[in-house]
Structure formats: C-alpha cells, structure tokens
Amino acid sequence: QVQLVESGGGLVQAGGSLRLSCAVSGSTFSLNAMGWFRQAPGKQRELVASINTGGSTKYAVSVKDRFTISRDNTKNIVYLQMNSLKPEDTAVYYCNRLVGIGGAPFGSWGQGTQVTVSS
C-alpha cells in the first residue's frame, strides 16, 4: 500500500516562499516519475510540476521560473520550492506518482497540504 504524506503548507503573504514536502512509502520511489498538483476551490486539480527518475523537470506555464521541484531518492521525498507566491497560487497541493514526466497520475492520493497566499 503506497502512502503519500504532504506537508509544509501554510499562510504566506504575496511574494513569500514555502517549501512543500511529500514523503512516499510503500513503493519503489526511485523508479517513478513524481508530480505536484494543486486544486483551488471550484477548480479541477492541475499538474504544476513534475520530475522524472533522471531528474528532468517540467512545469506549468503559471509556475515556471517561480517553483522548483526536486527529489531525494535516499529519503523517498519529493519537494516543491515555491517562490514569489501569488494569491492565485492558493490551493490544496498534492503529490502523486506519474506515468512519465508530465503524464497522468496513478494510485491513491494523500490528504494534501493547504497553501494560502494573502494579498
């Protein structure tokens, strides 16, 4: 049973930074591409950043040059460094395994972590 535990969210002012973490257990973490998603109220969940097993990354246009995804295969953790945050980044953030970089998610979801950016 794969478990995903997201953490690091919170309330921050516009222009601030947060670092999210996603701890993965129960799977061969190093063999999977990973992604960070977000879901704002009334909107569909969207993929904002992904990283493959080799460390290549891909970003949504809305977060490019502000967010950085990384992974630590020794700790089974994927991170999302978020800088220059904007109110429109407010959402619940989730991580999941992907069918390749930028691909569809598969498996169960964690509980997510709330990010709120005030103006």
Image (tube, rainbow, N blue to C red):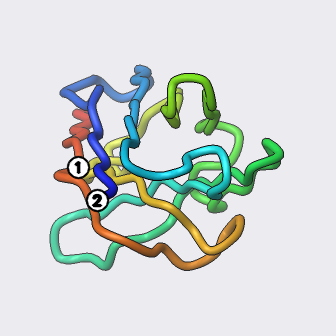
In terms of secondary structure, where does tag 2 sit? loop
Instruction: Estimate the spatial distance between the alpha carbons at disc 1 and disc 2, rounded to whole Å.
Output: 18 Å
- Name the residue carrying label 2: 1
Pointer 1: what residue? 112
Q: Residue 25: image x %, image y %?
A: 37, 42
Circle number at residue 21: none
Above or below 76: residue 98 = below
Q: Quadrant of residue 113?
A: top left
Percent from the top left, x then y, of residue 57? 75, 49
How many marks can you see? 2
Residue at 23% in and 49% down: 112
Left-right relation of 52 to 60: right
Give the amino acid at mark 1: Gly
In what quadrant of the picture does the N terminus appear?
Answer: bottom left
What kind of residue is marked 2?
A: Gln
The residue at 56%/67% (across/down) is 98
Quadrant of image for the C terminus: top left
- Label 1 sits on a secondary structure element that is loop
Q: Identify which residue is drawn at 33% across, 53% down.
A: 94
